[in-house]
Image (spheres, rainbow, N blue to C red):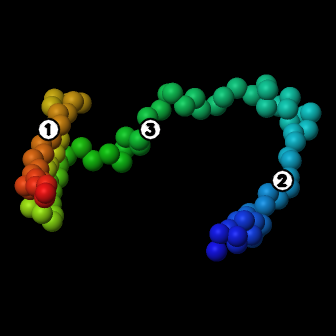
Amino acid sequence: MRRYWPILLILAAAPCAAQPGTVYRLTPDEIAKASKAPAVDPLFDRSLFDETEVRRDRRVHGEVGAFVGTGGARGVFGTAEMPLGDKGFAAFSFEHSDYGRERQRRR
């Protein structure tokens, strides 16, 4: 099987061979037009999120979870976010886990 690895690698890479790409170039008129036109909509003037779509229900939101595993592993975890004032918020998280008893070495 070891002597077939190079052949398999070559066959696997054959369909992935790079295809020649197409180059698109601007005409001199398009270059002049693009260099004279200012940026219409600067990125730093707007929010990343649409402010009209944001639900501001001003309630506490969060999640909790638990796990149970082999060998006595168990744990719980959670997080909560609560509004503070008009634009602030506070987040609280907790986690407690126990991975069971340690294995003892046998002699």
Quarter of the image where the N terminus is located: bottom right
Quadrant of residue 12 in the image? bottom right
Q: Which numbered disc flags the more N-terminal residue, 3 or 1?
A: 3
Residue 64, x across and y down, in percent? 14, 54
Residue contact between numbered discs 1 and 2, judged by CB atoms under 8 Å: no
Residue 47, x across and y down, in percent? 43, 34
- Left or right of residue 100, residue 55 in this image: right
Q: Residue furthest front?
A: 107
SS at mark 2? loop
Residue 56, x across and y down, in percent? 24, 43
50 above or below 103? above
> Circle 3 is placed at which residue position?
48
Q: Alpha-carbon distance for marks 2 and 3?
A: 34 Å
Label placed on residue 82 = none
**Residue toward you, 91 or 48:** 91
- How packed mark 2 is, by other alpha carbons closer than 10 Å (few <14, some 14-19, many 20 or more), is few
Mark 3 or 1: in front is 1
Quarter of the image where the C terminus is located: bottom left
Q: Which numbered disc flags the more N-terminal residue, 1 or 2?
A: 2
> Circle 1 is placed at which residue position?
92
> Circle 2 is placed at which residue position?
21
Mark 2 or 3: in front is 2
Q: Amino acid at mark 2?
A: Gly
Q: Amino acid at mark 1?
A: Phe
**Residue toward you, 29 or 81:** 81
Residue shown at the point (72%, 65%) measured from the top left: 6
